[in-house]
Image (tube, grey):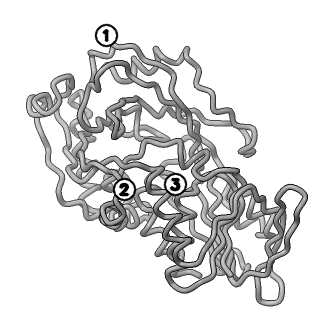
Amino acid sequence: MHASTGAPPALLRRLAVGRELALRGRTVYVVDRADRVGAETSSRNSGVIHAGLYYPEGSLKARLCVAGRPMLYDYLESRGVDFARTGKLVVATGATQRARLAQLRATAEANGVRDLRVVSGGEAAAMEPELRCEEALFSPSTGVFDVHGAVSALRADLEAAGGAVVLDTEVTGGGAEGGRVVLETRSGAERLRLRCRTVVNAAGLWAQVAAAALGVPPATVPRLHMARGCYFAVSGDAPFSRPIYPLPEPGGLGIHYTGDLAGRGRFGPSVEWVPGEDPGSVGYDVDPAAEETFRDAVRGYFPGVDGRALTADYCGVRPKVVGPGGGWGDFAVHGMREHGVPGLVCLYGVESPGLTACLSLADHVAGRC
């Protein structure tokens, strides 16, 4: 038996892992404490398919993003899930930023991204008339997709392979016992005790909590750092036809523009570090007073923002393994050699580009099961 931990965020990635294991002949139950598919983190994101520009060479983020991007495009096409290969522009708005843009290109090429093109400010403005920059990096393989459609497709594949999604069920305890992993769950008044060949803890924000419940030695568990990211919707017609990104900032990729498949545009996410390590304490409200901060952040590349209304939209929280000033934290995939618990695989810090990498990550995790 395979089972995932019962925590609400990142269900898409759990479904991808469950699907992969089911296709390999395993009996799979994807356990989720939410009462519906796609709640919280999986539904609170930009829906961008990333090319692999930002991540240190050799990191799991770099390797799985570059490998996962074509896998995801192929999967979406084969399953009839909506997507658009829009491309994106990463912009430099000053001389010092042009040097950073060159460094970003070098990082991307070291990761195996070979299709990038530097465009002048004039070329960028011809592509996007409302855009102002001195230079930009064009990534033609970036896109956007219907996250909810992908969740539905992965669930259908999982169930067709004999697996099941078990909702409204919380993991309360467990651990190694007699060569198996015991998983204790609660759903309302009903409690179950399952003996599993493998348990994959892919609980997103709740991964550290789930690890503690499953008896993982605390010294092996990376500390959870939480970064809230808020979005503001832009009124009227979409100002851009593709994602527009500034250069990355500590903790994130900068407040950028993305449009969804219906043509609605938004700016975000911000980076707001949340104190403590309790995912249950995080609020998802967006403060309308942050509007001016967003305007200031995007005015450098979108001066027309002053003629547009911005409306508080939604908020998501990213699980990170490094905090403020800590640089880029990589995905952490821990098996027995890291924590000593046979049959248990724990995923920590699976934030962006986790959606892009969902299928390659699933393959990587299945290889450790």
The quadrant the C terminus occupies is: bottom right
Q: Is residue 39 left or right of residue 129?
A: right
* Of 235 and 295, the residue lying toward us: 235
* Of 86 and 322, the residue lying toward us: 86
Say what secondary structure mark 2 lies in: loop
- Residue at x-position 28% and y-position 50%: 142
Q: Is residue 57 visible?
A: no
Residue 307 disc label: 1
- Residue at x-position 51% and y-position 22%: 312
Say what secondary structure mark 1 lies in: helix
Say what secondary structure mark 3 lies in: loop
Distance Cα–Cα, label 2 vs label 1: 35 Å
Q: Position of residue 45 (x, y in %)?
A: 48, 43
Up-down relation of residue 239 to residue 205 (above or below): above
Q: Position of residue 116 (x, y in %)?
A: 18, 52
Q: Where is mark 3, residue-wise? A: 329
- Hey, what amino acid is under mark 1? Gly
How crowded is the residue under tag 1: few (<14 C-alpha within 10 Å), some, or many (20+)? few
**Furthest-right residue in view?**
189
- Residue at x-position 49% and y-position 31%: 270
Residue 81 disc label: 2
The quadrant the N terminus occupies is: bottom right
